[in-house]
Amino acid sequence: MSMNRQLAELQKQGTYIRVGLIGAGQMGRGMISQIAAMKGMRVIATADLRKESAYNAYIRAGYREQDIKQTNQLEEAEKAVAANQVVVTEDMHLVLAMKEVDVIVDATGIPNLGAEIAWKALLARKHVVMLNVETDVTVGPLLYQMAQSANVVYTGAAGDEPAAIMELFNFAETIGFQPLVAGKGKNNPLNVEANPDSAREQAERLNMNPKILASFQDGTKTMIEMTAVANATGFLPDVDGMHGAEASVDQLIDVLRLKEEGGILGKYQVVEYVNGVAPGVFIIVTSDQPEVHQEMQYLKMGEGPNYLLYRPYHLTSLETPISIAKAYFFQEETIVPYHGLVAETVAIAKKDLQPGDHLDGLGGFTVYGKIMSAKEAKQQNALPIGLTDPSLVVTKPIRKGEVITYDQIENTKSLVIWELRRLMERGILS
């Protein structure tokens, strides 16, 4: 039975998939409204430190004031759900503890917070859907192993660009094509010096957090997303940081081919981003079957031997319910680090750093991210971008543009993501 029919059947039976959401920012708010329009699914509890953001998200989705219970007490929350209300709280641990919740969605975008959410949700044997690629590229392989051991699903979210790429990749592999390039468009020109101050005016116009916009502009978000694709497919960047060429959709096949074929690539089976095709995602494929080439040419897919499969949109959190339903009905992931830690997004100094400086994390003033192979990152003792946090203090001078290494910083605070990273590197669950 198809997913929409299964959801309709749940509704007919008077029940639904019960979702617990942590993070009521732009992504979380959109997801609440989208699910409110669906059958057979409901966001029964939402946690955010700005409780009014979660409350307003429900109001905008059509809930009445009397439908919403604001509480930080577990017993009150469970009684509210039993009375067909939804719960708003400041305490994410309440949502994680609610036995009524079937699937946890992390929409915080904060690496350390996402690590704690996923870890505790998996310990509670709940399915986990991550709208937090930052956590996934840092400790995702460990969380994926843990989910398998617990017989629940840990997955990235449909609608995020990595998942949209994997949709094309899985389709192509299933019917026998050979994927050569997996890629996405970038929405804005690369500016590795972007920071919250430089991004503030545009962020205010777009009703965005300036740090989040800066993490897009400085390329960190793109590097992280393509690291997730690398870990899911086994593909690597052709060069550190990827090429980031300018190309239209019609030019992708010609640009993203081998150098000896007139393109820019030194090898195939790579991840890449391109300026000029945002918000689209794509893969480039080929085949070793002559009859398939004839058919593709007949279908006006190009002259070959390489062909473009292109999706011109991704709907971010509006598609997340697909991953929720796939986990619940089919025990199926959308995108996971199937190949383990293949690539790494490492921290690069955004400016000259001196002893005593603090690393302020993604989209801040001190670091940006660059993708490279995990093997190379380990050889350089490079610090993963997902481990950066204001609690990290610089202990040695670091020049602008240099890879930041573990021996150049001191961690002054116990962070969940650091502990999980240590467990992963020691192979505790292997």
Image: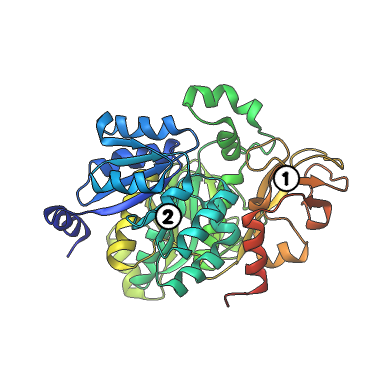
Q: Quadrant of residue 56?
A: top left
Marks 2 and 1 sit apart, C-alpha to C-alpha, by 28 Å
> Which quadrant of the rendered structure holds the N terminus?
bottom left
Give the vertical position of 243 relative to 216 (above or below).
below
In the image, taking residue 10 as reference, residue 374 lies left or right, namely right
How dense is the environment of label 1, judged by Cα within 10 Å: few (below 14), some, or many (20 and up)? some
Q: Nearer the viewer, residue 180 or 34?
A: 34
Mark 2: secondary structure: helix
Give the vertical position of 33 relative to 160 (above or below).
above
Q: Badge 1 is on which residue? A: 391
Q: Image point 22% across, 59% down: which residue? A: 3
In the image, taking residue 396 as reference, residue 141 lies left or right, namely left
Q: Badge 2 is on which residue? A: 97
Q: Quadrant of residue 142?
A: bottom right
Q: How many marks?
A: 2
* Residue 33 picture location, percent across and down: 30, 38
Q: Could you tell me the amino acid type at mark 2?
A: Ala
Give the vertical position of 182 relative to 211 (above or below).
below
Q: Nearer the viewer, residue 121 or 218?
A: 121
* Residue 420 picture location, percent across and down: 62, 62
Q: Nearer the viewer, residue 344 or 155?
A: 155
* Residue 5 picture location, percent across and down: 16, 58
Q: Image point 67% across, 43% down: which residue? A: 361
| Label 2–label 1 contact, CB within 8 A | no
Mark 1: secondary structure: loop
Q: Quadrant of residue 179?
A: bottom left
Q: Residue furthest bottom?
A: 430
Q: Image point 43% across, 67% down: which residue? A: 286
Q: Could you tell me the amino acid type at mark 1?
A: Ser
**Residue 119, can we see it?**
yes
In the image, taking residue 346 as reference, residue 167 lies left or right, namely left
Name the front one of labels 2 and 1.
Answer: 2
